[in-house]
Image (cartoon, rainbow, N blue to C red):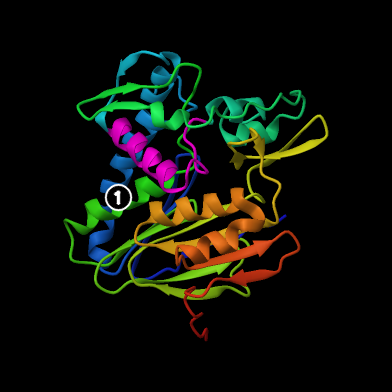
Amino acid sequence: MATLEAAATVCNGTATWRALGTYVHLSTADASALEPARQIAMALLDDVDRTCSRFRKDSDLVRANAGAGSWVSVDPMLVKAVGAAVESAAQTDGLVDPTLGHALVAVGYDRDISLVLAETSDPAGISVPARAGAWRDIQRDPAGGLLVPRGSALDLGATCKAWAADLIVAAIGAQFDSTVVLSLGGDIAVAGPNGWPVAITETIDDPAGAEIVHLPYGGLATSSTAARRWVRDGVTRHHVIDPRTGEPTSGRWRTVTATGATCLAANTATTAAIVLGDRAISWLRERDIPARLVNTSGRIVRTQRWPEPEATS
């Protein structure tokens, strides 16, 4: 099934590469700012991967998970990333839960997604629901310490890309007087005076029928059950886990896109909406979150403040 992706449209300066297991698309309104901006982005993405990856044996996150129940000395960047994940959990009453590491391994997401998709012989695992409220027991020392609750394992996949996108555009915006946009696997952050047009399409490589909206500031994010899917023992799995069951969500929405004051805020809303299923629209409306939802049959529903599409030539 095609996934809905949100991609920044190309302007004066554009660079594209891969990091964190996905694509990176960086554009600057001032072409002369592109190369130094790219260097900033690449350095920060390397730091995020080194500290926050669940798939690198040498990462700080893997060491913290291995030492669950005890304080582990880690890079302060991981502490900040975990803090962002805990904030998302608090804002959603645990619907976006960073303690789903064991649940993701149980459903087969135990390595980089390219390797998961290539493997067809692994047996299906037994679901591992997150302990209710375990995220509240995560302890952090801003100077560089982390305590993962005993019996838990952290996974920052629900928040880390969006948090990193915000971090990068803020760092670039602090140095250049140019509007900048970064799309990190479809999680988009914008900084600068003019905002940016964004194309919402069924696939990132096919602009036909794209819905173009203007993102004036902040972020836009998409969560989807149509991407990162694999089969184990004849059972189709995906990476969006309901923390209450430990199983991939099975609700009515295959894709949710939202805007927010930050990319992290937008991504928090989209992940929560996918988990909520039938309750998603009322949850989004109660919080006045602009969103675009696509159900499993392809029908599109928009909440009240979703930006009007721009005319295309």
Q: Nearer the viewer, residue 257 or 214?
A: 257
- What residue sits right under mark 1 in the picture? 168
Q: Residue 156: which quarter of the image?
A: top left
- The relative height of residue 34 versus residue 126 in the rendered view (above or below) is below
169 in the magenta segment: no
Q: Nearer the viewer, residue 80 or 129?
A: 129
* Residue type marked 1: Ile
- The location of residue 84, given as percent across then percent down, is 35, 42
- Determine crowd level at label 1: few under 14, some 14-19, many 20+ residues with C-alpha closer than 10 A: many
Q: Secondary structure at mark 1?
A: helix
- The location of residue 41, given as percent across then percent down, is 31, 47
Bounds of the magenta segment:
77-99
- The relative height of residue 21 versus residue 205 in the rendered view (above or below) is above
Point 49% across, 30% down: residue:
99
Q: Nearer the viewer, residue 58 or 105?
A: 105
Residue 192 visible to the viewer: yes
Dominant SS type (magenta): helix
Point 30% across, 50% down: residue:
168
Q: Nearer the viewer, residue 23 or 171?
A: 171
Q: Residue furthest right?
A: 234
How many labels, in total? 1
Quarter in which the N terminus is drawn: bottom right
78 in the magenta segment: yes
Residue 204 visible to the viewer: no
- The location of residue 229, given as percent across then percent down, is 68, 42
Point 60% across, 48% down: residue:
275
- Relative to 260, 94 lies left or right: right
